[in-house]
Amino acid sequence: MPETTPTPPDTLSRLLNLSHELGREERRLAILGEGNTSARTSPDTFIVKASGSNLRTLAPAGVTECHFAPLLKLLDAKSIADSAVDEALLASRTDSASKKPSVEAMFHAWLLTLPGVNFVGHTHPIEVNKILCTKFARTYATRRLCPDEIVCCGAEFVLVPYVDPGLKLAQAIRRAVTAYVKRLSRPPRVILLENHGLIALGGTPEAVLAASLMAVKAAEIFTGASALGTPRFMTPASVARIAGRPDEHYREKMLGLR
């Protein structure tokens, strides 16, 4: 295996900080070993939370650096045994002494190849999952209730129907995100996984955290508005206006979202 450049300390520290923020107990985004995070470290490598680690207490030893190529190759497999997936995950490590990367490292690898995406955070927020476990998931994904939801999360979420975590999920995410990019000509900021959780992606840890927290706020508003009656959604024209306003783009930049 060729020599690899050590992970930039700043990238690792930023990923650890993001993980700790997402793992804060009072935010109810992830408990125990739930969720995972990742960051690009070079054109060929990325770091990802190791299997079984905890976001709230994640330490350098709980992070594994991987090569993109072996994991991206898996996404084209038509059928492959779970044991072969495990072997590929272990083989992708830049250091054989590192812990096994999360089985969801496959979708992290692919998402980190999208333009402008340097960090990814996957969580299981209680308020979001309350909706993702109902028939209202697509409405929540495609409609908007407040301007700041658009600023932090984009005009729409991607919604991925439930599939088993692992290779099938990574392939389903690739299909759904590819369709989104083809339709809207930009990567999403948030991906929703039915009966599972949320993935936020961005150029900075701040963008990932903001999208995650705003998606939770939007979920609480959606649930509350639905309990009181029929939610009054923003019109498509209003959503497009907020998404395209130069002053909102400037605010996104100041907040570290761009």
Image (cartoon, rainbow, N blue to C red):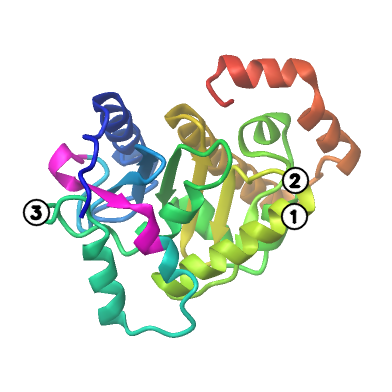
Q: What's the residue at 9%, 54% (across, down)?
A: 97
Which quadrant is the N terminus positioned in?
bottom left
Judging depth in this view, the residue of 114 and 142 nearest the camera is 114
In the displayed structure image, the side of residue 207 where residue 81 appears, left or right: left
- SS label for mark 2: loop
> What is the crowding at mark 2: few (fewer than 14 residues within 10 Å), some, or many (at least 20)?
few
Q: Position of residue 240 (x, y in %)?
A: 84, 36
Name the disc covering residue 171, or none: none
Instruction: Verify CB contact (< 8 Å) between mark 2 and mark 1.
Output: yes
Neighbor class of circle 1 (other Cα within 10 Å; few <14, some 14-19, many 20+) is: few
Give the amino acid type for the residue marked by disc 3 in the picture: Ala
Q: Which residue is drawn at 32% across and 28% down?
A: 14
The amino acid sitting under disc 1 is Lys
Q: Give the range drawn in magenta.
A: 57-71
* Left/right of residue 152 with respect to residue 83 in the rendered view: right
How far is mark 3 from mark 2, CA to CA? 40 Å
Q: What element carries label 1?
A: helix
- Give 224 or 32, whichever is nearer the viewer: 32
Q: How far apart are marks 3 and 1 (CA)?
A: 40 Å
| The furthest residue to the left | 97
Q: Is residue 185 above or below residue 192?
A: above
Asked if disc 3 and disc 1 are in contact, CB closer than 8 Å, the reply is no
Q: Is mark 3 on a helix, strand or loop?
A: loop
Determine if residue 133 is in view. no
Residue at which label 2 appears: 185
> On the image, numbered disc 1 is attached to which residue?
182
Q: Which residue bears the numbered disc 3?
A: 97
Earlier-in-chain disc, 3 versus 1: 3
